[in-house]
Image (tube, rainbow, N blue to C red):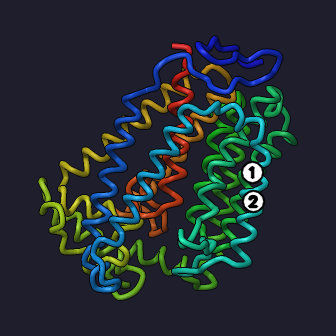
Amino acid sequence: MDRAFSLKGSRTEKKGVLSDVISVGAMDYTLLIVVVILALIGVVMVFSSSYMSAGAALHDPYYYLKRQGSFFALGLLCMLFMANFNYRYIRRYSFILYAIANALLVLVLVIGISSHGATRWIPLPIIGQFQPSEVAKAAVIFFTSFLISNNKNLLNKWPTFILTCCVAAVSSVLVFLGNNMSTAIIVMLIGIGIVFTASPYITRFVVAVCGGAGALIGYLVLSSASGNFRAARFEAWLHPFEYADTYGFQPIQSLYAIASGGLFGLGIGQSRQKSFLPEARNDIIFSIICEELGFIGAVVVLLLFGILIWRGIKIALNAPDTFSSLTAMGIVILIAGQVLINVAVVTNSIPNTGVPLPLISYGGTSLIVAMSLIGVLLNISRCSKA
């Protein structure tokens, strides 16, 4: 049973009834400050990387600045709300959230908006569009954590171990059906990461990872044989200048941007490569950071992410119960995984794939969901054992 908390001015948890507010200490202000700084850097860099294209295409150079600023304000409100809301209610309703997320993933296959070969968004009035896969990431974190924390022996036997892994696999497959392989990998990474954190049996984890890696390699081999765009991306990764006019164009321009930044960068708004990079405000924004802020600026951004991940791991280790600990680790895995893949793509260390840089890349759903999840992390830090 979860540890009961003594609350000043609110009800405590008794006989399985959850209190309205969990508050036993101060939240992790280091984490809060780092997240706000990263999100503000994102707002600035989205504007810096988009004002020229927005002015030319939309006749409003401030278009993306206004939208990203609005997303940041809403994300900040959601983060502060989740930092004070009793996050254990999420545990109780995690299956409902998971079911809704998967239903939305099915809906996006039916009425979704397609762009760059992938179907990721549901059209919405006023907002414009909504990306269900971001909600699916959160749902997989909560529901997988709930299943494991609710049954300590769940990972002891192969059938239930596989069943637990299937929580992420179902959502991952639905995302993949929308031709969004990169996000599908992230969703699966979250589920496997949480299972690895909770499982005392390393062998089963290794088997699961090898099975997943084998399936991915098999798919890539078949893709190569059929000559589809993923095979072309793989070839462009190996020989980018041979595909300079097609799939190698973005990696080459990204590397040019990184190289031209030097040690201290060209200055905010002075990027030259943003005129060539397609949608520089999105997944490739780290290359603009390197060009405008230089090696020093890029290192500072990565150090801020390092602090975020370190504080998240610390919160997970000191969490009051299994659900809280696994949820915290799931959030850390999500952030760390996306940062690693995004930076690897921008530097052409892995084949090109579309993964946003958390808190920085343009996008309302990703920013609001990420800040909401970090709000849960801050909430857990308030209930820390140490």
Q: Residue at x 35, y 88 (%)?
A: 245
Mark 2 crowdedness (10 Å alpha carbons): few <14, some 14-19, many ≥20: many
**In the depicted structure, whether residue 354 falls above or below residue 137:** below
State the image quarter where residue 58 is shown: bottom left
- Asked whether 63 or 382 is in front, the reply is 63
Residue reaching furthest to the bottom: 245
The location of residue 66, given as percent across then percent down, is: 35, 65
Name the side, left or right, on which 351 lies relative to 108.
left
Could you tell me residue 131's position as x and y percent?
Answer: 59, 65
Q: Check residue 124 in the rendering and tell me which mark sits there, or answer none.
A: none
| Identity, as a three-letter code, of the amino acid under mark 2 | Asn
Mark 2, residue position = 102
Give the residue drawn at x 50%, y 40%. Answer: 374
Q: Nearer the viewer, residue 116 or 113?
A: 113
Amino acid under disc 1: Tyr
Q: Label 2 near label 1: C-beta < 8 Å? A: yes
Q: Height in image: 350 above or below 321?
A: below
Which image quadrant: the N terminus? top right
Element under disc 2 = helix
